[in-house]
Image (tube, helix red, strand yellow):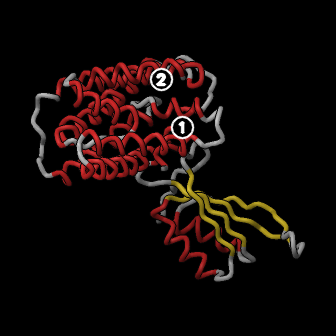
Amino acid sequence: MKRCDDVTELIQEKVQHRKLPLRKIVLRAIAITIGAILMATGLEIFLVPNHVIDGGITGISIMLAHITGWKLGIFLLILNLPFVYMGYKQMGKTFAISTVYGIIVLSIFTSFFHPIPAFTDDILLATVFGGMILGTGVGVVIRNGGALDGTEILALLITKKVPFSVGQIIMFINIFILGAAGFVFSWDRAMYSLLAYVIASKAIDTVVAGLEESKSVWIISDDAEEIGNAINARLGRGVTYINGQGAFTGDSKKVIFSIITRLEESKLNTIVQDIDPNAFLAIGDISEVRGGRFKKKDIH
């Protein structure tokens, strides 16, 4: 799932560490705190009381808490910390500290919320809203350089020794974890758990990528300048012209490159279709855009 890719892309980034300003540290701590509280809310107020689990270490913790009668926060802390330690050298000090802090906050608030009765007894509503709230919380933490589940870290270490991607390893692990819910609770709860996991994954994608997900645009046309001017005037987006050559014909071509949001994709298609119906158009997803002049110009 994309949820796995989003997490691993962020934790695999290797940057040269600089001391963060105090303001950024405080804002990051606040964001991670909010994200951990949201995840605790999704778990203890919606999912756990209805015997629905999430994937990863969280799912294992929920089942162990149910079997032993111990508080969920204890297992979340105990089971996650070893993986953070194992991946310390891979992810760096900042990631490790952010993750440990997030897990501690998560453990505290799951214990605090445990006596509170479920917000709803409707299993479907609990699954949908619990998954959404949990996923939003995890996404907030990921966007601020941390994580709340050690499964991604474990998969990152395993993938170096086996011919499988991180996403495939996490999916394989979660199949067993979500399947185990059928034995611990019931098979209908296992299916609801799978639904909660999918919903949480989509919520994470939305938070990490942003509501206005960016897209890269490549256009090859004999009317490149007219299309470029139209994109600039009607969308307010800058364009870059790149000189290219057709491998088959040897003809020189001008290639247009631009960045738009997914909400502007339909309008871009209309612009290209109106000017040159035979133009080559390729649109791809971009996880992040920085620098340059991506900010939209005012259109009068």
Which residue lies at the image location 87% right of the left edge and 74% below the top edge? 248
Q: Earlier in the sequence, mark 1 or mark 2?
A: 1
Residue farthest toward the front in the current orientation of the protein: 183
Which residue lies at the image location 71% right of the left edge and 72% below the top edge? 224
Residue 289 vertical placement versus 89 (above, below): below
Which residue lies at the image location 69% right of the left edge and 58% below the top edge? 240
Question: Which one is in front, 24 or 208?
Answer: 208
Mark 1 neighbour class, 10 Å CA radius: few under 14, some 14 to 19, many 20 or more: some
Residue tagged 1: 8
Image quarter of residue 45: top left
Q: Secondary structure at mark 2?
A: helix
Mark 2 neighbour class, 10 Å CA radius: few under 14, some 14 to 19, many 20 or more: some
In percent of width and height, residue 131 lies at 29, 46
Question: Which one is in front, 114 or 185?
Answer: 185
Question: Which one is in front, 240 or 59?
Answer: 59
Residue 21 vertical placement versus 199 (above, below): above
Image quarter of residue 181: top left
In percent of width and height, residue 249 lies at 88, 76
Left or right placement of residue 259 versus residue 20 in this view: right
Q: Tag on residue 83? A: 2
In percent of width and height, residue 174 lies at 42, 42
Labelled pair 1, 2 in contact (Cβ < 8 Å): no
